[in-house]
Image (spheres, rainbow, N blue to C red):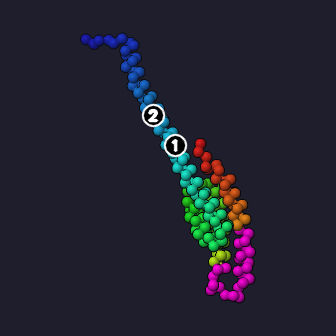
Amino acid sequence: MLIQLPYWMLYLQALGPTIVAALVGAVAFRQWLTARAKLKLDLFDKRFAVYKTISDAVFQSHWTGPAAEESSKRINEMRQQAQFLFDAEVNQIVAEMDQLAFEMRNAVRLRDDPAFSPGNEQIVREELQKVMNHPGDMIVLIEKLRRAVQPSMSMF
């Protein structure tokens, strides 16, 4: 013969697993929030590193002309990383900066090359004149870059 349990005990038996399931769901939700926050922090760190390296390279090349070669290389490396971290607008600005850095590097090489024939001073002057305007262009581009990356740098 079966013993019939009181209704309150039956409710209690049904309520126990429901409470456990709700607690497991709450823990899973908190873990999801933590993983999401970590992903945003990791992306922020990577994006900020790219932005800072580009900014430093631009200002280094602006104030120390002979460092144009190293700065150009660093901007090009960061351009490759930025493709995976930022949107098309930021990548376009970084590409423009890379092109300007490349032109600056080539003009410095042209000026400093001892093997360059003396009959081509006009070409050297023209290249250097073009490059003299580039640091100002770079400053404008770095400001555009700063404004363009701001939405990507949000932690929320």
Q: Which residue is mark 2?
A: 27
Q: Where is residue 108 drawn, in percent x and y?
A: 65, 76
- State the count of labels: 2
Say whether residue 153 is magenta: no
Is residue 128 shown in magenta?
yes
Identify the residue at horizontal 56%, vertical 50% (top origin).
44
Asked which quadrant contains residue 10, the reply is top left
| Residue located 41% across and 21% down the image | 15
Residue in the picture at 61% in, 50% down: 152
Specify the label residue 36 is tagged with: 1
Residue at mark 2 to residue at mark 1: CA–CA distance: 14 Å
Q: Residues within 10 Å of mark 1 (few under 14, many from 20)?
A: few
Check the picture and name the quadrant holding the N terminus.
Answer: top left
Residue 50 seen in this snapshot: yes
- Relative side of 17 to 63, left or right: left
Q: Which residues are magenta?
A: 111-134
Q: Is residue 9 left or right of residue 150?
A: left
Q: Amino acid at mark 2?
A: Val
> Given the current orientation, which residue lies at the most extreme front position?
64
Residue 105 locus on image (x, y percent): 64, 73
Element at badge 2? helix
Residue 65 image offset from top left, x and y in percent: 66, 71
What's the magenta bit mostly, secondary-structure-wise? helix
